[in-house]
Image (cartoon, helix red, strand yellow):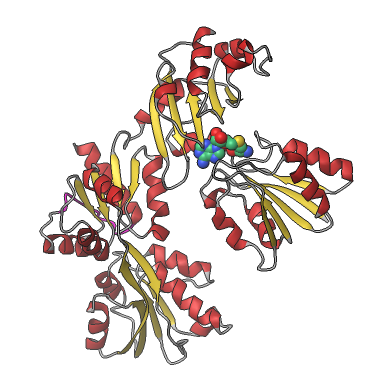
Amino acid sequence: MTVYLVGAGPGDPGLITRRGLELISQAEVIVHDRLIPTELLAQARPDALILDVGKRGGGSSTPQEEIDRLLVEHGSRTVVRLKGGDPFVFGRGGEEVEALLAAGIPFDVVPGVTAGVAAPAAAGIPVTHRSAASAVAFVTGHEDPAKAEVGGTKSSLDWDALARFPGTLVVYMGARQLEAIAQRLISGGREPDEPAAVIERGTLPDQRVLEGTLRTVGRLGARAPAIAVLGSVAALRHQLPLAGLSVAVTRARAQASSLVARLRSLGAAVLEAPAIRIEPIDGPVPDLEPYDLVCLTSPNGVRFLFDRLAAVGRDARALGAAWVAAIGPGTAAALRQYGVIADVVPEEFTAEGLLEALTDQPVERVLVARAAEARDVLVNTLRDRGAEVDVLPLYETVAEPLSAEQRAAAGQADYVTFTSSSTVKFFLQSTGGQPPQGRIVSIGPITSATLREHGLEPHVEASRHDIDGVVQALLDDVARR
Ligand code: SAH
C-alpha cells in the first residue's frame, strides 16, 4: 500500500521519532540497514517479514538496485524501509524514492535524527554556535580527495571551497580517509590548528570521542562508524562542567541510560560497568482486592507488577480503590505510564521517608511489591503500626560479571557512582574487593552505609536520592575542587 522511508536515528533507540516507531509496529515488511538500533525491531509485529539488507562483517551489502527492486516488489503491502539517521542524509533515500515513483508506488518519508548532529551533541559539541560557527556543512568523506584528483577522476566535492567554508565541517563516512581529507583541507588553506573531534559510535553506550586539531585528526586512529567535526565548535566541549573527567556507572545496563546520557551531555567520558542485572521472579498473579494500600518501591517493581497482571489480561483496574504509594518520583513516573497517579510520594525517597508520609494514613492491609531482597524497615514499621502486611517479591538483583577491561576502566575512573547497595556489593565482588581509585559517589545514606561496611568511605553523597541528585552531587563536588 505504502512504502515508508523511516529514519531510525543515530543509534540510541530513544532517538527515533514517535511516528517512526508507530510505523515499525504496524509494518508488514521491514527492510533495514545494518546501522540501526536493533532494539527497534523488537517493536515489529510478530508476523512481520524482516529483511536485513545491510553490510556485515566486511561482506558486501545488497546492491542498491536490489533494494529498490525489493521495495517495489513488496510495495503492495505496508513496508517500512528503516535507515540509519535520516533517510535523506547520505542515505541513498533519494534513489529509493525515484524507484518507487517510477513504479507508481505511494511512499512517505519520516525524517530521523542524523548522526552528524546527534553524535557531536552526545559529545557535548554544538554544530553551530552564536560566537563560533554560523554555518555547518555536511560532507561525505567517502572519497579520498588525493586519489580522486591524482587518478584523474574528478572528485564530486570542491575541496578548495570546503577549505574556505566559514563554519563547521561535519564529515560522514570519513574514518579511513581522514588523514587525506585533513591534508587536502590544509593545502586548500584551512587553519591546521583548528580544533577537531571524532565521535565513534555516537549516542551508543560505547561511544568514544577523540580530540585533536586539523593537523592531527587523521592520526587519532578513528574507526567507523564515526563523525568528524572540524571547526572551533569542536573545542567547546571543554566548557562543559564534566569535560575531561571519566565517570563509571555501575547500575544495571537496562537502567543506566538516563544517568549515562546526563553525564555525557555534561561532558564526562562515561564508562559503563554494570555490576548488577535485574531478573523478574515468576509467581502467581496477585489478588489486589483485599488491600487498602499498595506500596511500590522502584520502577522495576511497577513494571513487573503490571507484567504479571497483563499476563492474565488485567490492568490498572486491578488496584481498585487501594491507595497507591510510590517511594519516589521515578516510581511515580513508572506508575503514570500505566495510568495510575500515586496517592503518596514522600519528600525523601527512602523507606523512612515513605513511612513518614504514611504516618497519618490509617491502613489495615498493605501489599509491599518489591525486590526479593530488600530492607525490612518498611514492612516491620507498618506491622508495628498494626497493619497486616504482605510482601510480594517481584524481581531479584543478580551479579553481572564485569569484563577485565570494564574492571580496569572503572578502577581508574575519576568518579565511580553507586546507585544502590547491590551495585556496591556486586561491584566489589567482581573486583575481588579491590576498591576503585577515583572518588566515590553514593546516591544516599543506605548505599553509603553499605560502602562503609565494605571499608569504603564515600567522597560524595547525594542529598536528593535519585539520578538527578547523583548528577547534582557530582557537579557540586567538581565545582568545589
Ligand atoms: N543517513 C545516516 C548516514 C548514513 S552514512 C544519517 O543521517 O546519520 C553512514 C555514516 O554515518 C557512517 O559512516 C558515519 O559517518 C555516520 N554514522 C552513522 N551512525 C553513527 C554513529 N552512531 N556515530 C558516529 N557516526 C555515525
In this view, the residue in front, 96 or 308, is 96
Q: How many marks?
A: 0
Image quadrant in which you'd find residue 295:
bottom left
Does residue 461 show up magenta in the picture? Answer: yes
Relative depth, front residue between 18 and 70: 70
Left or right of 205? Residue 151 is: right
- The secondary structure that dominates the magenta segment is loop
When the figure is inspected, residue 416 is found, relative to residue 184, above or below; the finding is below
Residue 124 in the magenta stretch? The answer is: no
**Magenta stretch, residue numbers:** 458-466
Left or right of residue 224: residue 236: left
What residue lies at 39% left-to-right and 63% top-to-bottom?
Answer: 329
- Residue 116 in view of the camera: no
Q: Can residue 452 be seen in this view?
A: yes
Which quadrant holds residue 353?
Answer: bottom left
Q: Please tell me in which quarter of the rendered image ligand 1 is found.
A: top right
> Looking at the image, which residue is at 42% across and 60% down?
254
Residue at 41% of width from left, 69% of height from top? 300
Near-viewer residue (79 or 53): 53
Q: Where is residue 385 in the image (x, y as percent from the top left)?
A: 24, 87
Quadrant in which the C terminus appears: top left
Residue 411 vertical position relative to residue 464 in the rendered view, above or below? above
Residue 66: image location, x then y, percent:
76, 44
Q: Residue furthest front?
A: 59
Which quadrant is the N terminus positioned in?
A: bottom right
As displayed, is residue 227 above or below residue 71? Answer: above
Position of 159 compared to 200: left or right? right
Q: Position of residue 378 (x, y in %)?
A: 26, 78
Q: Residue 172, image x and y in percent?
A: 56, 30
**288 shown above or below 108:** below
